[in-house]
Image (cartoon, helix red, strand yellow):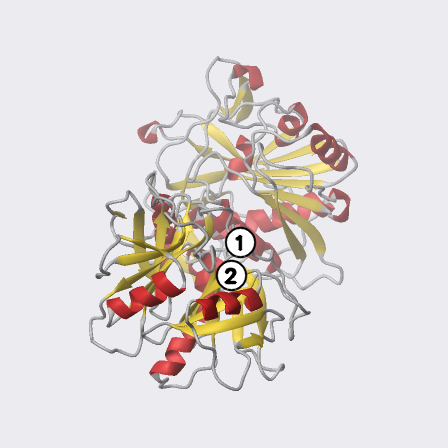
Amino acid sequence: MKPFVLLAALTIPSLAFAAADPIQVLLLDGQSGGPYHNWKLTTPILKRELEETGLFKVTVLTAPASDGDFSGFHPEFGKYQVVVSNLDSPTWPENVRGEFEQYIRDGGGLVVVHAADNAFPDWPGYNEMIGIGGWRGRTEKAGPMWYFKDGELVSDPAPGNAGSHGARRPFQLTAREPDHPILKGLPPVWMHTPDELYATLRGPGKNMSVLATAHSDPANAGTGHDEPILMALSYGKGRVFHTALGHDATGLSCVGFITTFQRGTEWAATGKVTQKVPASFPTAETVSYRADIAGMDPAIARGSATTATEMVDRPAITGISHLTLFTDDFAKSQRFYADLLGWEQAPAGDAKPGVRYYANHAQFVELVSPPIPRQIDRLESVAFSTTDVEAMRRYLGANDVVVPPSITVDSEGNRSFAVHDPEGNKVVFQQDGPHPPAPPAVAGRSLSSHIMHAGYMVRNRFALDHFYRDVLGFHLYWQGGDPANRVDWVMMQVPDGTDWIEYMLYLPAHPSLAQLGGANHLAPGVTSAAELQQTLEQRGWKPPEGRDPKLLGVDGKIQLDLLDPDGTRVEFMEYKPVKDPCCSPYTGVQPSAAAGW
């Protein structure tokens, strides 16, 4: 291969004028053959590349995994002029396949990007639409291989698997139908950024025009053939543009990819191309790429030119595991948590640093000594339960969160690690071990069997929302304030349960111990605050003189606040609201008491 020059295109290519009625695009994603095809990262790139032209209005639809629930999946294909597929799924229900085939036959457009040609190996209609595909068990039964030989497209029925590629390297594309609307005005040869060069693709090749090829170099595990890379097809009245480019942000950032993708989508939707060729289009020796597009991959943004961020799915976050609090007097804390609240102590005996008080077998408060005696901040950390702590560590690392190199395992087999949120709060993720604590010897003493939320002081809601909502998947449960036109409290519910955290936004710049202890709090749930008060008084607790200790919060729930010996507020709260909340409605499932121990 000839030497090439790397040119970073820092400006957006020439854009078409916005259409009065933009082309409606349905962008499909939702599954891939492995984490190497990170559709969660590439879909936003594809969406951005289309919408920046002003020609397209893109709606993203995430399909269920093939073994998932399709009962609520009803794509209204007819609303769109073209479907862009960033989906590599092995199968779809028969009714959805039929609707999609009819949509294309009736004139709907289709754009197939890279790994989408791995999808649906056993769906004849789809394989006719895309012409050729690879992987997912395809063999010669899927059809012959197709490639250019001596300037002509040939089919090769030789047996073997479908789909191969070498390492991701730059390569040249050669136009085979330069007068096609998608390629018209492009140079006859141009250089593409490092990408997978697909080879040995197989399929029916029906009604398929190969627009451009690339030479699959034997020195890079290639075939020695000129392999189809850009294709135009027809299926009934529908037009299909198939690009084998675009494995990752590096491939998608190439101005050559962007230009052919934008023009190919317009052609599939309308049958014509109105977009001009950008001045930054690559030449035969020059790679031209968009730094802003490549930088949408966190790994590349950190300085790696070609390292792609693999997709790591977030494991479930099911609720609050525990809170670790600082205490200066373990004996007083023992009387509060064990004697008054009735929570099971482990280990038994005199309380020492590391003692735990269990509301149920999976939720507890842990007490440790503070690094500075009588320090104002009494909250050491909040921990969340996850179904796979090692997968959570990898997931957070892939999302640019600083994580430890490994997890820790305690004496009970609980596996955990800690990170810090954007405000420095210590956040722990724990996967419980196989040896939960034994049930209490005396049942029924616990005042609550469910720690349903934890709160802490927050200064920058935007930064916390990115961490808890965008990265971890928490969602807004309720928000409000006093007065009602102000937001003082924001409740963010875990993605796979009913527990939540509460942003406490109202504190002064330098809060007192009482103010910080009230903000950094835990909330056990109760069915009845009135019954709770009766039990507390039976155990020797005295309510404040002159007022009812029960309060009706602006969130519509009755609560009763206690303070532990170190000033941390324990906000007993009824599970269900007794009236509609102020300020905003609840948007999540209401919690309930834990079932048994």
Left or right? Give the position of 22 relative to 60. Answer: right
Which circle marks residue 424 in the picture?
A: none
Q: Secondary structure at mark 1?
A: loop
Q: Which is nearer the eye, 35 or 171?
A: 35
Q: Please state which amino acid type lies under the numbered disc 2.
A: Gly
Marks 2,1: beta carbons within 8 A: yes
Q: Which is nearer the eye, 501 or 75?
A: 501
Left or right? Give the position of 246 relative to 80. Answer: left
Q: Please state which amino acid type lies under the numbered disc 1.
A: Ala
Eyeballing the image, is 439 above or below 579? above
**Residue 74 image point, x, y percent:** 72, 42
Can see residue 35? yes
Which circle marks residue 525 in the picture?
A: 2
Which circle marks residue 593 in the picture?
A: 1
- The residue that appears at 44% across and 77% down in the rendered structure is 542
The N terminus lies in quadrant: top left
